[in-house]
Amino acid sequence: MPLLELREITKVFPGVLANDRVSIRLERGEIVALLGENGAGKSTLMNVVYGLLTADGGEILVDDKPVRIKSPRQAIDLGIGMVHQHFMLIEPLTVTENIVLGREPGHYGIIDFTTARERVREISERYGLKVDPDAKIIDLSVGMQQRVEILKALYQGVRVLILDEPTAVLTPQEVTELFTVVRSLVDEGLSVVFITHKLEEVVAIADRILVMRDGIVVGETTPGATDEVGLARMMVGRDVVLRVEKGAGTCGGTVLAVEDVHVHDDRSLEAVKGISFSVCGGEILAIAGVDGNGQRELVESIVGLRRPSSGRIELKGKDITHANARASIEAGVSHIPEDRRRRGLVLEFNLAENIILGDHRRPPVARRGIMHPRAITAVARKRIADYDIRTPSERVLAENLSGGNQQKVVVAREIGRDPELLVAAQPTRGLDVGAIEFVHRQILRERSAGKAILLVSLELEEVLSLADRILVIYEGLIVKEFAASKTDAETLGYYMTGGGGSKLDTGTGARQIATPSAGGDQ
Amino acid sequence: MSAEAEEPSTKRDWAAIAQKVGVPLASVLLAMIISSVIMWVSGYDPFAAFAALFRGSFGTPKAFGDTLLKSTPLILAGLGLAYGFRANLFNIGAEGQLFMGGLAVAWLGLLLAGQPWWITIPVLLLAAMLAGAAWAFIPAILKARIGAHEVITTMMFTYIARYLVSYLVIGPLKSPGQIPQTGLLPSESQLPRIQSLFSEATLQAMPFLKLGRAHTGIVVALVAAVVVWWLLKYTTLGYENRAVGYNPFAAETGGISVQWTIVKALCISGALAGLAGAVEVMGVHYRLFDQFSSGFGFTGIAVALLAKNHPIAVVPAALLFGAMAAGGGTMQLEANVPQKIILIVQALVIFFVAAEGIVTYFVRQRQKEATSHVG
Ligand SMILES: Nc1ncnc2c1ncn2[C@@H]1O[C@H](COP(=O)(O)OP(=O)(O)O)[C@@H](O)[C@H]1O
Ligand SMILES: [Mg+2]
């Protein structure tokens, strides 16, 4: 007898069929992974189950009995809990206060905190969810906050726990811990729905895998029956290359030259302490490093968002050291920012308005300060077609697109401008495999077109598969340079974590062997 | 899910427009209902009161003229506020810029005596815009350079402007006589009343043109509304203004100077407020004195909020507030309801617009119920 069953659930948003007659069953004590690209309809489906959205059709059965779930409260009463990607905790309150909120033990409005704390402690021990019941939420790490959310659901006595992309915000270490917790939950008889678009997680944790695409369940499998390549194919609907092939590089003359650049960060500390390198046309130069080692400041100084305190930056021989962002764009620098929602897009603007950002003063979009709506529409439609942006029209607001499509908008704008230099900072962060492949192909196409590409990424896989040359940055200095074909993730990881000593590498020293743990988490 | 068809998106546009218009309308309606309850509880007849309010603001051509008269500076001040809000700037000191606009006109108008109207009127309007912009310029620079919050600085500049005007009308610019005020503007510098543009015969034939004290400043205001709408929608200036207002980081990355955009936005906002002061002086009082504005710069905030910062919607929003100001007297006379009740209605409208979250919540709730009936 299934614990939870969905029959023919349909949910329509304006212009989008988010769920199209989806039927699934969940048995007692199993982990079902819901796998799908961004925008496949996973969150929508589970929000329907959790009572946050009302389905336009279909029915939900709990213990074989049809139920109507109109609010999360009703869902919880039926034993269904959900942890969202964005937590819903009250920051100034303690762990215990947050957990018992809405179901406080006690009488006549007086909360019995001793009992509450005891129960919280009891549950957290039973499921191996260690967390201090008296800590304030605001003082906890993201991983801990997630535990509190899970504890809260358990405290409310749920039998089904839905986790919506729980690993998106976690460090690799926290992911491992979460997996342990999830296993102990099912050992205690709970059932878990695990939403993700990451293939390796699905393989590691799921008993059963349901793959969603474009609002329908396209297949069901198990980790034993299908490997990652097969899962990727089901998810994207075509063959996906997890590592794109590229031909040999050519150097068509120096495009970007950076000479002894020093840059300060927002706190006026020196973040980039004298970096020099150059990038040729037709070459992808990657900067690999652990987050926070000066990459952001270096990129910002190149694209005109931050003044270097000393040094010189040249684009095709032209001095752009002190160019602002506008001058930098006009000189031929395009920039895919690391944070698309903050720096890449104006979410309240529609797609067309976003696609012209940066070109909004130039013909054909504008002449003498006056914009031409027809030209804007034409440019936008062309980019939408060329870069396969999935949207009902160019007038949809950027905030209503899925993450992958939002990134396509940024890529379309920056590459569509036909720059001399493309600075791509973490261009595939948070994207699913299909979108990653797309972005990688676009970057390689620019390379074939003889453009210079500076790639900054924390993902070693990405760096290794795309780059021709790799510089390792550590504490504001380039500590090592590699030809991409002559290194591997372990070696890079070793230098990224300071293994080479923070001295500039001359390239003559003996190559050191990496420690196994360093950098292996990618 | 990739619905390629054009139709759903246009349909959605209509739904979006309906939602945009629906919330302010609901706010006004709620305000009227609650103030009705307040009147009823206090022993007044709300129906009689609103009927009288309506008669006093739209009932006769003259009453409508009064509404137009009060709405004119509100449209201009509301446009100024709306333009600022679009850049995420709260020009709370529009009143000060309005005073400077009035001052510029009252002073320059006297100097320009003897010039034909087609020189004086454009020059005076331009001068008022410059004065308003100049008064916003220092707060703008302070905001752009050191991040000083415009709510504080423009407000402080409002005090300076008001005391400056008080001083000038008592001192250097005082006209001979007992009353602290500037001299009467020559007729070439006055904005003529609308009905004075038509012959007696025309007015006889078309009595709806007898708009009483309404003056041609309303034309200035309507033109300004269209110009601001056009600026926001069809120029790079407006595009950059909106981009900075929504997301300054993305704007900066796209090569837009956030600081320069802030300066331009506050100055344009100030110029529009300055115009509001100009039409008050040139069209109503023909001179400057301490109390020449009845807080139009502040009511402009409510107008912009109610219009949800849309320049064209500023016009009906200003008409609503203008009508309440114009009809209040009639309400007191005919329905025996104290004019102060109007303040309650106004306050409630502002409250509900500001508390849009609440209203939106109820609207959503209705929609949710509606969809769940389908399912
Ligand atoms: N509130 C909403 N309004 C309109 N469209 C939405 C809304 N929520 C989701 N969508 C659309 O529904 C589709 C499915 O979204 P979602 O369920 O969030 O996907 P997933 O969780 O699989 O990434 C997407 O095309 C998305 O743009
Ligand atoms: Mg989702």
Image (cartoon, coloured by chain):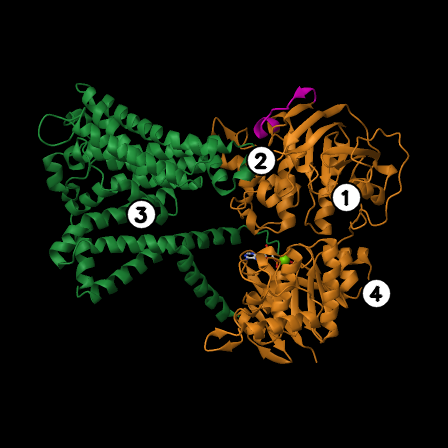
Chain colours: A orange, B green
Answer whether labels 4 and 1 touch (C-beta < 8 Å).
Answer: no
What is the spatial separation of the Cα atoms under label 3 and label 4, in whole angstroms?
65 Å
Image location (x, y in percent) of residue A256:
71, 26
Q: Which residues are magenta?
A: A316-328
Q: Residue at x 16, y 42 (%)?
A: B211
The reply to whether label 2 and label 1 mark residues of one chain is no
Q: Residue furthest right?
A: A510
Q: Secondary structure at mark 3?
A: helix
Numbered label tally: 4
Where residue A114 sits in the image (x, y, percent)? 57, 73
Q: Is residue A296 left or right of residue B292?
A: right
Q: Which mark is residue B253?
A: 2
Residue with the mark numbered 1: A462
Q: Seen in the image, is B307 located left or right of residue B125?
A: right
- Mark 3 residue type: Ala
Spot occupied by residue B303 in the image (x, y as percentages of width and height)? 32, 46
Q: Which residue is mark 3?
A: B317
Task: Tell which of B83 and A518 is nearer to you.
Answer: A518
Local packing at callout 4 (Cα closer than 10 Å; few below 14, some 14-19, many 20+) is: few
Look at mark 4 in the image and give the residue it sits on.
A224
Q: Nearer the viewer, mark 4 or mark 1?
A: 1
| Gap between marks 2 and 1 measured at Cα | 24 Å
On the rendered structure, is A108 left or right of A471?
Answer: left
